[in-house]
Image (spheres, helix red, strand yellow):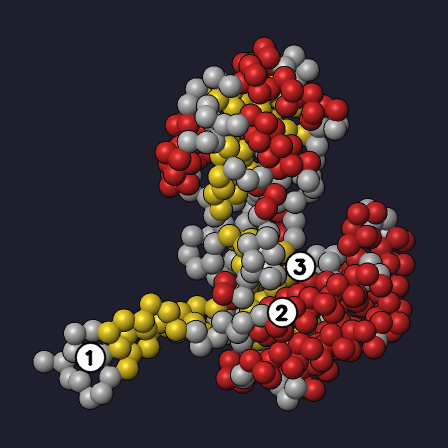
Amino acid sequence: MDTHTLDDTMRQLGARARKAARQVARADDRTKSAALRAMAERLRERKDWLQAENAKDLEAAKRNGLEPALIDRLTLSDKALALMAAGLEQIAAMPDPVGELTETRLRPNGMQVARMRVPLGVIAIVYESRPNVTIDAAALCLKSGNAAILRGGSEAIHSNTALGLIVRAGLEAAGLPADAVQVVETTDRAAVGKLATMTEYVDVIVPRGGKGLIKRLSEEAKVPVIKHLDGICHVYVDRDADLAKAQAIAFNAKTYRYGICGAMETLLVHADVAPAFLPPMSRAFIEHGVELRGCERTRAIVPEAVPASEEDWATEYLAPILSVKIVDDIGQAIHHIETYGSQHTDAIVTESLAAARRFQREVDSSSVYVNLPTCFADGYEYGLGAEIGISTNKLHARGPVGLEGLTTLKWVLTGDGQTRG
């Protein structure tokens, strides 16, 4: 597709989304939820057709040598489709955030001041090799009163296009505009750049993919981006930690799943407890196949650890590799996190209320835990029902982004003829 044609196509798509967004913003919860349930029904009814379309992507993926893990993510199995349908119904049953009044207060002159939760407008979502995101993103955007423009990876083009038709049918069945959710059907990578700069049509863009995609959008976008680049997560074992509890937490934080953004990448240990804590902890990791990279003090206690470099402290491994550092106090632990962390998720293990409160107050991350593993960084675990992603932004949404994160607030004032003197 030439540049001029692509530009026209994307602008038309944006204009349709903007028009649909106004209609969806006015829709009541009953209508939006009916659309989501209709999508779930059609997912189940059209399973064979969806899997036939998905087979085209799987065949191309195998031909192109896509990694087995990516092929697994790409596959619309019976289980995957059942989970997608169930997810639609779960989101339909969740409370509608739109129109919620918060911080209501009465002024001395009798004027009522409040804040109302309203949709963002048009949300563009760019993602890779996970066709389930087409359904998840459509559902979250619709429930929160937004229109969505979805651009999946080229390796899932047939699957995403088919799922987009399911979504459009569900919208129309409920009397909502089909353009409320649009799937970009071109595989031209330039389409992503267009989305990221169409400020007149797109209110926010959410990248869900690898670092390359997120870095590119962060650099090119003129539209606000909800994102996190790295998940360099820490667990700090304090001097006042229950060491058995700390071992269970640290082990779960690292080994629950290596490839998630909430996996622990650095273990910080107070010097006073390191001699008792690190030998059994290191054995557990090594027996599980985790490579340890330690500071000099760590290696004096755990000789199996290889020397950690400066680069290790700033690396998101997403693999069975863990860096370990001994610190002298909580202040040094916090300083290390400030220096090398990515403001994603960090945890302290301690029985000291003062240490716990200091850590939660001073660590500047989107999520800060006490006596919990960092792998809890997930919208479902927070009670959000579902999430569009995790944000390390400081403006607007931060942490797991659920329905509320896809809305904003406006001031609404109500009076009875008061005038300002």
Q: Residues within 10 Å of mark 1 (few under 14, many from 20)?
A: few
At 62% from the left and 37% from the top, the residue drawn is 253
Which residue is disc 1 drawn over? 110
For disc 2, the marked residue is: 91
Tell me: 343 left or right of 12: left
Figure check: 313 above or below 99: above
Q: Identify which residue, 188 or 260, lies in the foreground.
A: 260
Compare marks 2 and 1 and give the one earlier in the sequence.
2
Kind of residue at disc 1: Gly
Q: Which residue corresponds to the image point at 55% horizontal and 14% vertical from the top-left?
A: 275
Q: Given this view, does label 2 or label 3 mark the residue nearer the observer?
A: 2
* Residue 127 - label: 3
Which image quadrant: the N terminus? bottom right
In terms of sequence position, does the residue under pointer 1 or pointer 3 come before the other? Answer: 1
Which residue corresponds to the image point at 56% horizontal and 60% vertical from the top-left? 384
**Coordinates of residue 160 in the picture (x, y in percent):** 75, 68
| Labelled disc at residue 68 | none
Element under disc 3: strand
- Residue 420 lies, in percent from the top left, at 14, 80
* Quadrant of res 128: bottom right
| Residue 148 sits in quarter | bottom right
- Going by the numbered disc 2, the residue's amino acid type is Ile
> In the image, what residue type sits under mark 3?
Tyr
Q: Decide: few, some or many residues near mark 3? Use Cα within 10 Å; few <14, some 14-19, many ≥20.
A: many
**In the rendered structure, are the residues bearing label 2 and label 3 in contact, judged by CB atoms less than 8 Å apart?**
no
